[in-house]
Amino acid sequence: STSPTPSSSSPPSARRSSSTGSPTQPVGTRLVPYDGARITASIPAGWTIDENEVQKPSEVESKWSNPADTADYLLIDERPATHLTPEQDAAPVQASTEQTSGYHEIYYGAGDLTGVDSWMWVFGLPEAERIDYFFEKCSSTFGVLGSTGTDSFGQLRSTFRAVAQSVGSSTCR
């Protein structure tokens, strides 16, 4: 099989959304700890938990949303370590999503998380921009998706990265 190549030659840290607009919350959102039975993370203060480690067919899912703007949400998936590369973990999710009407890829390549091998996928859908991180820590494989309206992505992108950076397994501290 062949490996997909990044759809952009710009390094992940240099990529920025071209969207502009007023933020729905201030830049530099304060994060608060979440310490669940399976995952730990830092989540934006004031965001509400919609799904708290819900068992799905292939993973455990937690979801938080911004009560000030329902377009803003975070989704963290955890499952036993696949021991695949982050790119291999991302590929089936990306292949499925790219079939969605209005999908456009902004970046698909090496992630920008510090100290962990990660894959990062930035894409747009009608009315939304999303960033999805894939990585393995301890004995778990994680997917961390941040989603917001196209006018807010530039303001929330660093928050979504900070959340992904903070995610870990409750069983491995």
Image (cartoon, rainbow, N blue to C red):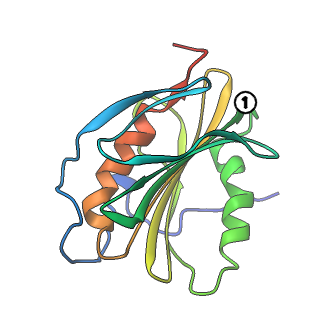
Is 123 in front, or is 36? Answer: 36
Give the SS element for disc 1.
loop
**Of residues 162 and 91, the one drawn nearer to the viewer in this rendering:** 162
Q: Position of residue 169 (x, y in %)?
A: 57, 24
Figure disc tally: 1
Residue 3 visible at all: no
Taking the image as drawn, is residue 116 in sight?
yes
Specify whether 8 is left or right of 29. Answer: right
Residue 159 is situated, as x and y percent measured from the top left of the image, at 31, 48
Q: Quadrant of residue 58?
A: top right
Q: At 24% across and 66% down in the image, what residue appears?
A: 24
Image coordinates of residue 145 in percent, x first then y, are 52, 53
- Residue under numbered circle 1: 81
Tell me what residue is drawn at x 70 percent, y 79 percent.
99
Amino acid type, mark 1: Ala
Please state the horizontal and vertical placement of residue 142, each as a whole percent of the image.
Answer: 61, 39
Q: Is residue 23 above or below residue 81?
A: below
Locate residue 78: give its quadrant. Answer: top right
Vertical order, 167 against 4 (above or below)? above
Q: Residue at x 27, y 65 (%)?
A: 154
89 shown above or below 130: above
State the residue at coordinates (18%, 73%).
22
Judge left or right: residue 12 versus residue 120: left
The quarter in which the N terminus is drawn is: bottom right
